[in-house]
Image: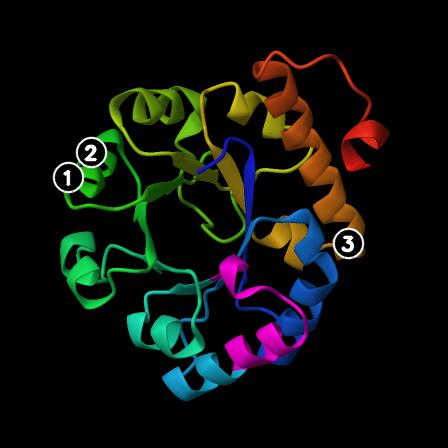
Amino acid sequence: MAKGEIHLISDGKLSLPQFARLAANVHEWVDYIHLREKSATARELLAAAKDMLSSGIPAAQLVINDRIDVALASEASGVQLGWHSLDPAVARLLAPGLRLGRSVHSAAEAEEAAMQGADYCLYGHVYPSASKPGQPARGLALLAETVQRCPLPVIAIGGIGPGNAGEVMHQGAAGIAVMSGICGAGDPWSAARAIRLAVQGVACRDLGAKEVTFDEIAD
């Protein structure tokens, strides 16, 4: 997994058709698009996935939350496993060709995910998040510890936007995941672009590239 990835995750507040349209609008700025709709049926998720694919979103960008059956039926590239999902080792037996993400909340959970055969970890929440009201943020220090102890790429999530993406990446994260920062934005396309430029600017400097402007990166 390349450094500086951006994962867009549906926040459950938009209807499935609304999210499909938003995803199609911003997919050029993100690397993966997660369909995370806990109240939707398998039939509804599959219809939404097919809608996204027919709108021009590549299957390689599509990730289905929890539902391995829907991921396989839609030919998505991966599945995101939560704490309530099958362990990565079991999921791998069912779907050896899928990229498996595991949602974790500590360095110990990330280490366990690695031993279970996950491909990457989604760690959070780093900052206070509207999707986790009343729950304390874990902060940058625990993110850094998780990155150091986990042999897998760690994608950070939780309250991350253009203003703080740089400090998240400087902790060694392989990328960031965003929900309301794009889904709840008045201009999702511009929000996604701003996040891409913030993350990519840090990634370029970390790789020893020459200093470039955001316009040059966008080109």
Q: Mark 2 and mark 1 in contact? Answer it, CB < 8 Å.
A: yes
Q: Residue at x 25, y 23 (%)?
A: 149
Q: Residue at x 80, y 48 (%)?
A: 190
Where 6 falls versus 131 (above or below)? above
Q: Work out which quarter of the rendered image holds the N terminus and state it.
A: top left
Q: Nearer the viewer, residue 173 or 180?
A: 173
Q: Report the side of 86 relative to 46 (left or right).
A: left
Where 36 falls versus 151 (above or below)? below
Secondary structure that dominates the magenta span: helix
Asked which quadrant contains residue 161, the reply is top right
Mark 2 vs mark 1: give the one in front.
1
Q: Residue at x 25, y 36 (%)?
A: 110
Task: Return the x and y of residue 2 as percentages of the image width and height.
Answer: 49, 35
Task: Return the x and y of residue 154 as percentages of the image width and height.
Answer: 39, 34
Q: Nearer the viewer, residue 169 or 99?
A: 99
The stretch in magenta equals 48-62
User: Quick one: SS at disc 1?
Assistant: helix
Please name the amino acid that badge 1 sits on.
Met
Where 59 falls versus 218 (above or below)? below
Please name the amino acid that badge 3 sits on.
Trp
Residue annotated with mark 2: 111
Q: Is residue 54 magenta?
A: yes
Q: Is residue 191 magenta?
A: no
User: Is residue 183 in view?
Assistant: yes
